[in-house]
Image: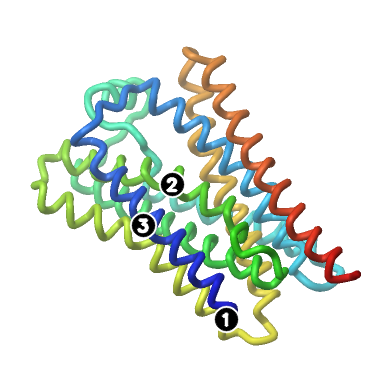
Amino acid sequence: MDPNFLILLLGYALAILAASLLGGYLPAIVKMTHTRIQMVMSFVAGFILGVALYHLLPHGLVLIPGPGAVEKAVGLMMFGIILMVLLLRIFNFHQHEFGDEADDFHHEHVHEHTSPGRRLISIGLGLGLHTVTEGIALGTSIRVGEIHGGEVGLAGFGVFLAILLHKPLDAFSIIGLLQAAGHSLRTRMAVNVGFAMLCPVVALLTFLGIGLLGHWEEEVVGYLLVLAAGAFLCVSLSDLLPEIHFHSHDRAKLTVAFLVGIVLAYGLYFIESGAVHGLETHEMH
């Protein structure tokens, strides 16, 4: 195992930890308007969609062996989508707004009969499981960089950036709901720290655990990547589709933000692919 990739992952983990902690503090220091949240969500949804299709899926296909690689990849990606849909259905955790404006919106469009306490627990569990899938995707993507012999500085950067951009929204949601429910500052701080640490810890455990698989390493990494692609695809569309269905305002701005996210994801894919292919060409000569 190249220690440089572990150092890179530690750097990613610290950045994600800081971003998540910042997201948890936002409800106390920043007034996030409905339009601002929708702009951020549209951009992040486009970026995560691009990461799923330009980064995770292609890398996974390369590493899955045998003539049935495409069928295996599609099956696992579908499983990732179904798994995330079930989590969303059971825990109903993908809400990035709270307060009066969010309550008015949900009373108008969604008929929920769960108690506030049960809803908060469901959102917490759902976001926790969702964060575990992100950590697995990040740890696996760093392993891909090591397997392909790519530049350390580019390994897994697309996946890292997708998590970095999305994690503050998740922390913003759960801490904002705790604040709205009247929980103490001490409780909110403890939850914020615990939630922020979850993704980095899972990513490190995944990275180190995969290294123990020996000759199975590449195949397992390929399976995990396409599984994560399905989960990322579902997360992206679960953010985007409700906004398309329920919101008729700011269509142009939200569409541009969504497309910018996709273009950024493709740009990173282009840079990463060029670096890996350039290294492979150099080694052949």
**Which residue type does callout 2 highlight?**
Arg
Tag nearer the camera, 1 or 3: 1
Judging depth in this view, the residue of 73 and 24 nearest the camera is 24
Residue 261, position as x, y percentages in the image: 58, 34
Per the image, the residue denoted by label 3 is: 128
The residue tagged with tag 2: helix, strand or loop? Answer: helix
Within the image, what quadrant is residue 212 found in?
bottom right
What's the image's color scheme?
rainbow
Q: Residue 211: which numbered mark, if any?
A: 1
Residue 15, position as x, y percentages in the image: 40, 54
- Asked if the residue under mark 3 is in contact with the one under mark 1, i.e. CB atoms within 8 Å, the reply is no
The residue tagged with tag 3: helix, strand or loop? Answer: helix
Per the image, the residue denoted by label 2 is: 89
Is 106 left or right of 284, judged from the image as shown?
Answer: left
Sequence-wise, the earlier of marks 2 and 3 is: 2
Q: Where 1 sits versus 176, above or below?
A: below
Sequence-wise, the earlier of marks 1 and 3 is: 3
Check the image and name the residue furthest to the top. Answer: 249
